[in-house]
Structure formats: C-alpha cells, structure tokens
Image: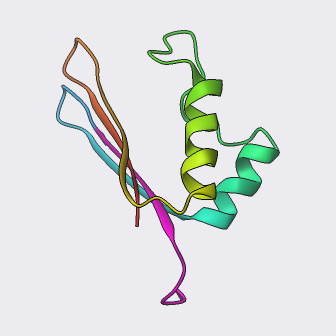
Amino acid sequence: MRISEERLLRVRVLSHTGDKIHIKLPIEFVKKMIKNNTFDFFYGAEDMVDSKKLLDVLIRAFDYDLSGEVAHMERKNGDIIKMIID
C-alpha cells in the first residue's frame, strides 16, 4: 500500500525493438539501493552514460525535492530511458 505522501522514482525504458519497461520504486528504497551499490540498472559493458554521475544526479534531485523528469536519454539505436520523480 502506498502512503499518499510517499515519493516515487519511475524508470521507463522504451526499446527500439518495441519492449517497454516501467519500474516504480519509493525514493527512500532507491536511496538505500544506491548506498548499498545495488541500484545497478545502468551498469554494464555497453553503458551509455557514466553510471556514478547519473546516480549522483539522482541523489541531488532527491535532496532538493525535485519532481518531474530528471533524466531523458536516447541511444542512437532508438532506445529511450526516462527517470521521473513523482
């Protein structure tokens, strides 16, 4: 059950092959995952972004209580990744 005041991070991935991934996670949970190095959606051999810098941006966005789209990435193959704070 979601508490009405609870903030969420939404990650949306729209792949060029038609796959769609939508993830919603509570901000406090994401903070704990980042602190424990388990928020690894963007780690891998084909990283399109600097994962550490992206996670730092997320933490700053959480600290400043930002909302809305905080990251929008488009790969040359057509994949789109969005990170949104509600």
Q: How is the image coloured?
A: rainbow
The residue sitting at 76% across, 56% down in the picture is: 32
Q: Position of residue 18 (x, y in %)?
A: 17, 35
Figure quadrant of the C terminus: bottom left
Q: From which residue to which does the magenta span run? A: 1-13
Task: Kindly indicate the quadrant of the structure image that contains residue 1.
Answer: bottom right
Q: Say above or below: 27 vs 79.
A: below
Q: Say above or below: 12 vs 72.
A: below
The residue furthest front is 64
Q: Say above or below: 5 vs 60.
A: below
Q: Position of residue 73 (x, y in %)?
A: 32, 28
- Total number of numbered discs in the rendering: 0
Task: Kindly indicate the quadrant of the structure image that contains residue 51.
Answer: top right
The residue sitting at 51% across, 72% down in the picture is: 7
Nearest the viewer among 51 and 21 is 51
Q: Is residue 6 magenta?
A: yes
Q: Position of residue 34 (x, y in %)?
A: 72, 45
The residue sitting at 54% across, 28% down in the picture is: 42
Taking the image as shown, residue 61 lies to the left or right of residue 80, namely right
The residue sitting at 54% across, 89% down in the picture is: 3
Q: Is residue 52 magenta?
A: no
Q: Say above or below: 63 vs 57.
A: below
Task: Kindly indicate the quadrant of the structure image that contains residue 53.
Answer: top right
